[in-house]
Image: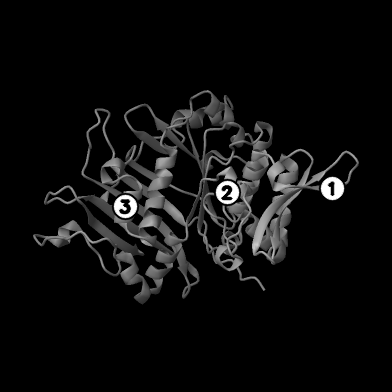
Amino acid sequence: MTPAPVTLTPFLTRVRVKNFRSLSECDVRLGPLTVLAGPNAAGKSNFIDAIRFVRDALRSSPGQVLESRGGLAEVLHRSTEGSAQADSFTIRLDAQVPDRVAGTALHTSYHLEVGFDPRGGGLPVLRGEEVRVSGGWRGDQFLPARAGEAGVAWRDHILLPRSAPTDADVNALYVRLREMRFHELLTPALRVVDDTPASSAGNTLGERGEHLPRVLSALAREWPWAKETIDGYVSTMVDNAAGLDGVEVPEGDLAFVVGRFVGGDGLTSRVDRRSLSEGTLRLAGVLAALFQPKALTGEIPLVAIEEPEVSLHPPMLGALYDALLAASRNTQVMVTTQSADLLDNASADPGHVVVVHNEGSGTSIGPIDAAGRHLLDEGVLTLPELLRSGELRPAPTPVTTEQEEAPE
């Protein structure tokens, strides 16, 4: 018996970032489905990476995460002249988690600031951290104002995990932040024979596409409706395709992907993984990310996918939007795109779109601006035409007031 979904969509309701990579400052409201739209190098991936930084820091430590990104100096926002505009960056995530007592949603917020040690030395330090539930501080907090004159030594861990075991509400936030998934799919990872032991691979798709056959096999066994949904999208978007399957070989504890295609005689034949096109494999990876079992149960609260349209035929991309929308009923979905064809769908809502733009001075990010909404409302341009024409621009970032610091 499969567990009932416990997800709340959206999980992340608001993201505020300062001085992280190309993001000088942004304040973005999110819904169940968010499409980050903009040209190449606008900063879409940097916005995703700010959220991922929090997830990665909770899984390891801020120091290790910075090291994997080339160090603090590589992460801090730089002005057009090339000098750092600030000596720290901040990320604040507002989220909703289930209140199991009241049966409603709890509004929570997690804030992290990392920067150079103000006492000198050029080393990174934890300069601020807090967690709030329904507007009130919970657990261990560190804020510069509270530190006073006392020296704050850099420690290669953060405080949230210390509070989580003793506070159910904080733990609900902590667990969900750690379980967010960020997919940048690679064809070799999707195509390879998975020789990871089934007990280790589980039924969760790797962030590069690892374990695709295990996920497809698990869906066929335990979530047949989801597997049928994936096959339905594949057959709609790939010529002559009937679906893709994960084949498990218990004797060798390995698994691989095969395709099913309908020939001119109407008979279905199996196609070896090595003969499947890059587009077919990437589509399977995108759909598996969206409908993987833990996304269906709410254990994965957010699935982010970088440019899901890559290698897919443009006329078929409108159907992919339907898949994104359907998946967002079970888990929060966030994608980056520079493709107008992805938005060429009657279900594409301007409210789903967050525009990302960079004219050289840094990334601007926000909902479609007033001029763009006017063109849409008057029927002058459609949403894909607005993106193709270069008239898709973000509304200005609002100024955050002290009253808005607490989650709604």
Dot placed on the residue nearer the N-terminal end, 2 or 3? 2
Is residue 218 rendered to the left or right of residue 109?
right
**Residue 103 seen in this snapshot:** yes
Along the line of sight, which residue is nearer the eye, 283 or 360? 283
Along the line of sight, which residue is nearer the eye, 205 or 351? 205
Tell me the tag on residue 404. 3
Q: Which residue is mark 1?
A: 268
Q: Position of residue 43 (x, y in %)?
A: 41, 36
Using the rendered view, name the quadrant where residue 383 is placed: top right
Q: Position of residue 68 (x, y in %)?
A: 35, 49
Along the line of sight, which residue is nearer the eye, 188 or 179? 188
Dot placed on the residue nearer the N-terminal end, 3 or 1? 1
Report the residue that reaches farthest toward the right. Answer: 265
Give the residue type that dot 3 points to: Glu
Dot 2, crowdedness within 10 Å: few (<14), some or many (≥20)? Answer: some
Q: Position of residue 156 (x, y in %)?
A: 27, 60
Colouring used for the render: one colour
Which circle, 2 or 3, is nearer the viewer?
A: 2
Taking 192 as reference, is 386 above or below it?
above
Q: Which residue is mark 2?
A: 189
Give the residue type that dot 2 points to: Ala
